[in-house]
Image (cartoon, rainbow, N blue to C red):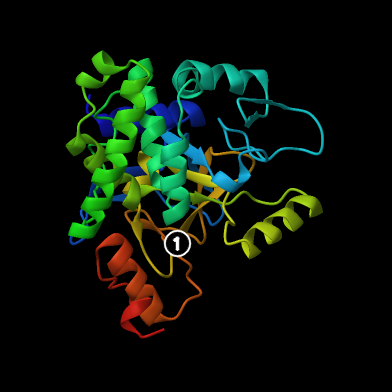
Amino acid sequence: MSLLRRLLSTAAAAAHGPLPIRVALTDSAGRGVFATRPIAAGEVLHSAQPLVSHPSRSLLHEVCYSCLTRKPGKGGGSSGGCYFCSDACRQHAAKRFHGIEKNLDWSLLDDHCSLRGLKYPYMVKRLACMVISGAIGADCLDILQPARLHRGMISEMEEEFELLDSTFRKAGFQEELAAFFTKQWYINVLARIRVNAFRIELVANSYEDLLSSAIASVACDASVGNAVYMLPSFYNHDCDPNTHIVWMQNADAKLKTLRDIDEGEELRICYIDASMDVNARQKILAEGFGFECCCLRCLSGD
């Protein structure tokens, strides 16, 4: 069974029934997601758990280090400077990445990322810890589309790799690193994370959550973190989407339709802020995702 079939099968099992979607090739945008039956507006197509995620650095004491649930007024606990919303999340993190991560000195990487405003190297760091722990395979992101990289990006990535490599080796992980951790692996993984990561912005459940989100927006950090998913990454972009991705309480994503969908219609989400004008959208999509958007909205100049 192919990886895509396994993904759809796993998502269908979680939904307790067949999914109304299939993944197939499009005429011009590679793989895409299509409806296998008429779908009503507001229907949940499927949910998805992240392959790898990481909270925003400014919210490490406010967001669960494992599932990215916001910290309530009381309760929860911290470990190694990080907040966990439950013992289950603490134990889950310890098995997959935090058992390795918490014992290493990440100060040089923190300084580097803080100075340059970087967030994705933290996701590669977590992914590397997951590979070392045996929680995930080193090739788990290979099926995803990579970003186009220019010389300046690659030079910076090489510097980040050296920082990570040095940190792991100082902690005695030479043997574990030998199996996968190379400069090319780091660059390939980061290139895929750059174009496939979602900014996770939780739906506000209360006035306090809404106020907290507003304060974070002013601080230029509206998201609680970032995550990479497998199946949601196959949805193509449209500036007038018929589907959107939402997060209710944590990093588990839900894909929902925005309007009625016909059988065979491609399901598309918007990768960016759809309220921007056409020139701004085109610039961000070209520079950040490597394509020129030819959706009907852009072609009309809206």
Location of residue 29 (image quadrant): bottom left
* Percent x, y of residue 296: 34, 76
State which quarter of the image contains the C terminus.
Answer: bottom left
Q: Residues within 10 Å of mark 1 (few under 14, many from 20)?
A: many
Q: Viewer-proximal residue, 120 or 1?
A: 120
Location of residue 270 (image quadrant): bottom left
State which quarter of the image contains the N terminus.
Answer: top left
* Percent x, y of residue 289: 30, 60
**At 26% across and 17% down in the image, what residue appears?**
174
Q: Viewer-proximal residue, 230 or 57?
A: 57
| Residue ID for mark 1 | 242
* Percent x, y of residue 62: 67, 41
On the picture, is 226 further left or further right than 34? Answer: right
* Relative to 60, residue 277 above or below: below
Q: Secondary structure at mark 1?
A: loop
Q: What amino acid type should be assigned to the residue bearing mark 1?
A: Asn
On the picture, is 247 further left or further right than 97? Answer: right
